[in-house]
Image (tube, helix red, strand yellow):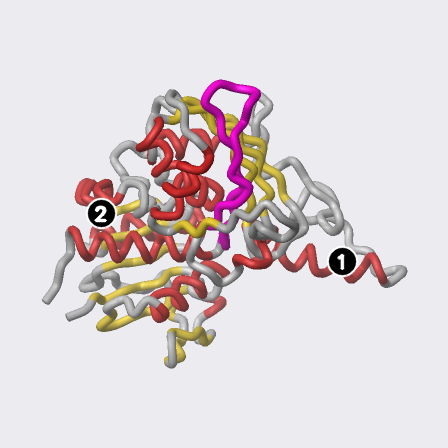
Amino acid sequence: MGYRVVVAGATGNVGREMLNILAEREFPVDAIAALASRRSIGTEVSFGERTLKCRDIEGFDFEGWDIALFAIGSEATKTYAPRAAAAGCVVIDNSSLYRYDPRIPLVVPEVNPEAVEGYRERNIIANPNCSTAQMVVALKPLHDRARIKRVVVATYQSVSGAGKEGMDELWDQTKGIFVPGQEVAPKKFSKQIAFNVIPHIDVFLDDGSTKEEWKMVAETKKILDPSIKVTATCVRVPVFVGHSEAVNIEFEDFLDEDEARDILREAPGILVIDKREPGGYVTPIECVGDYATFVSRIRQDSTIENGLSMWIVSDNLRKGAALNAVQIAETLGNRCLRKG
C-alpha cells in the first residue's frame, strides 16, 4: 500500500526533479498530484512513464493526501503549507521559510534521520539549503570520529540555484558575448555571470556576510551540532548545475587523511574519488544527474592542529533539493507513516 503524494511547484526545476526522483526511486505512490500556479494549469510534466497535467494549487484540497513536497518559494509556502498541514498532509518544504523554526525539524536523512519524528508538532519538515545539505553529509561521519571544532568553507554555486532565470541569464549572456550588439545586461544577478564569478548570493547582512553564508552557519548548527563554528564565503559561478565547495575542517582530535578517506568511503550518500593525478577528482559537470555527494582532494592541513581540507561536489537540484526532499519522505514513511 502506497501514499497519496502532492508535488507543489511541479513546473519548476526542483519540482520536475522531485517527480523524476520519486519515479526513479520507486517511491510507493498510490496517487500523485502535480500542482502549480494558475498560469500553469494544464501544463504537462513527466512522472516516470506517465504524463501529469498541473492543477491549480489555489483551489486544491489537501484533505486525504499523505505527503506534499513543496518547491514554490517562501511567499507561496507561507499561504499553502499551513493549509496542507491543517488538512493532515505532511509538508516537506524546500524553501527557507521554516528552516530556523525550532518547532520544525530540519533534516538531512544521512545526518539526522531521527529528527523527522518532530514533524508531529506542525506537520511540516524543512529541507535545508542546497549548499548546506551536501556539506553536512560529508561532515557527519568525520564529526562522529574526531569531533569538529570549526569549518571554513568557500562555495562555488551554480546558476541553477537561482532558478530558471539564473540559467537563462548565463545562457543568454554567454551567447551575447560572441554576437556583437546582442550583449545581455545583468538582471537576475548583480553583475555579469558569464565568464565571471560573483561573491554575493542573497542579501547582505549588517555584519558583512550574505544571507546564504548565514544559512550555512545556522543550518549546520541545527542539523549537525550547535557547538561547531562555521564561516562561509558563498560565490556564484558560471556553471549550470552542480555546487562545489572547498572545505577546511579543524577537529578536536587528530584524524589522519587516510582514515578520513576510509570513513567517507563507508559513509551513506558519499562517493570518494580522490586520486592525486590530473583528473583524479570530481567536477560539477560530472555530478549532474547523480544521487551521490562526491568528495575529492582529501589532505592534511599542516597550518593548524588537527586539520583536514577537502573538495565536495553535488548536483544541487538533486541532493541539494529534490533528492533530499524525497529521502525525507522515505524516512518519514519508514519511521512514522508506515502503511500496509
The amino acid pointed to by label 1 is Thr
Residue 89: mark in rendering: none
**Residue 299: in magenta span:** yes
- Range drawn in magenta: 293-316
Quadrant of image for the C terminus: bottom left
Determine whether the residue tagged by mark 1 lies in a helix, strand or loop. Answer: helix
Position of residue 154 in the picture relative to residue 32 (left or right):
right
Of labels 2 and 1, the one closer to you: 1
Q: To which residue does mark 1 refer?
A: 174
Residue 228 sits in which quadrant?
top left
Position of residue 37 in the picture relative to residue 281 (left or right):
left
Determine whether the residue tagged by mark 2 lies in a helix, strand or loop. Answer: loop
Residue 123: mark in rendering: 2
For marks 2 and 1 on the same chain, the one whose residue lies earlier in the sequence? 2
Q: Is residue 79 visible?
A: no
Quadrant of image for the N terminus: bottom left
Rendered position, 129 above or below 10? above
The amino acid pointed to by label 2 is Asn
Q: Residue at x 38, y 60 (%)?
A: 8
- Along the line of sight, which residue is nearer the eye, 200 or 310? 310
Position of residue 267 in the picture relative to residue 315 (left or right):
left
Residue 45 lies, in percent from the top left, at 44, 73
Q: Main secondary structure of the magenta part?
A: strand
